[in-house]
Amino acid sequence: TISGWISEVSFDSEFDNTFEGIKQKSIEFNKYKTTEKAQKGIEKINIETLYNKIQSSLKSTNRPEYTPAEGKEPEAIQEKWNELEEREKAHEEAISEELARQEKLSSLFKPYNIDSSELEQWIDEKEQHLANKEDIRTLDDARLKLMNLDVLDKEFDNNQKRITQLEN
């Protein structure tokens, strides 16, 4: 019955603290509203229409009014439907707030992620350079290699400050 379905509908307000997770919850909630709830909304309208037809038919033949079982009256169903919509609204607000929070976190982490990837790329390049075994045969080759290592050492010192900032 529609009353039973309304009572059984529940919303999980536990989120997994990820942007992808909350986006998935939002998609699932929208799917629920456009499929399951929409179908039940049509069912509810059909029940109200049928109830009104029955009442109209009974009234036109001077028969007593039909009284549905307790909790099955259109007014009771509408009251439960309104409560469901209030729960949905609260759930939708919770999803929106969490989505906004995750978007803010994502934007705050963006500079960190950019710096981190730039430093990782720099480290990879320098590791490849240091792993390269060069055959040094002359004094000029040795001086050039020493100058390259000095430049690398200065770059490392400069980037060490960025690494420390990222760690903190």
Image (tube, rainbow, N blue to C red):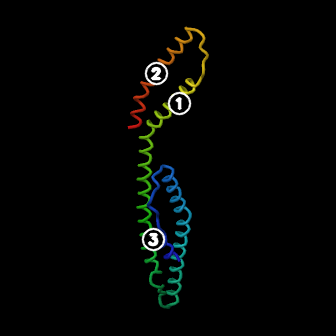
> Badge 3 local density, few (<14 within 10 Å), some, or many (20+)?
some
Is residue 27 positioned above or below 48 on the image? above
Q: Position of residue 168 (x, y in %)?
A: 38, 37
**Residue located at (43% from left, 53% from top):** 96
Quadrant in which residue 163 is drawn = top left
Mark 2 secondary-structure assignment:
helix
In x, y percent, where is residue 9? 49, 69
Q: Residue at x 52, y 69 (%)?
A: 41
Depicted 43 relative to depicted 14: above or below:
below
Crowdedness of circle 2 by 10 Å Cα count: few (<14), some, many (20+)?
Answer: few
Frontmost residue, 157 versus 53: 157
Separation of disc 3 and disc 1 at Cα?
57 Å
Q: Which residue is mark 3?
A: 81
Q: Which residue is mark 2?
A: 153
Check if mark 3's residue and mark 1's residue have beta carbons within 8 Å.
no
Q: Secondary structure at mark 1?
A: helix
Mark 1 and mark 2: Cα distance apart in space? 17 Å
Tell me if mark 1 has few (under 14), some (14-19) or many (20+) residues whose alpha carbon lies within 10 angstroms of its own.
Answer: few
Q: Residue visible at 45% across and 71% down?
A: 81
Measured Cα–Cα span from mark 2 to mark 3: 70 Å
Q: Position of residue 14 (x, y in %)?
A: 44, 59
Q: Earlier in the sequence, mark 3 or mark 1?
A: 3
Q: Mark number for residue 121?
A: 1
Report the number of discs. 3
Kindly report which numbered mark, 2 or 3, lies closer to the viewer in this rendering.
2
Viewer-side residue, 89 vs 140? 140
Q: Nearer the viewer, mark 1 or mark 2?
A: 2
Q: Earlier in the sequence, mark 1 or mark 2?
A: 1
Label 3 or label 1, whichever lies nearer to me, is 1
Q: Amino acid at mark 2?
A: Asp
Q: Which numbered disc, 2 or 3, marks the residue that appears first in the sequence?
A: 3
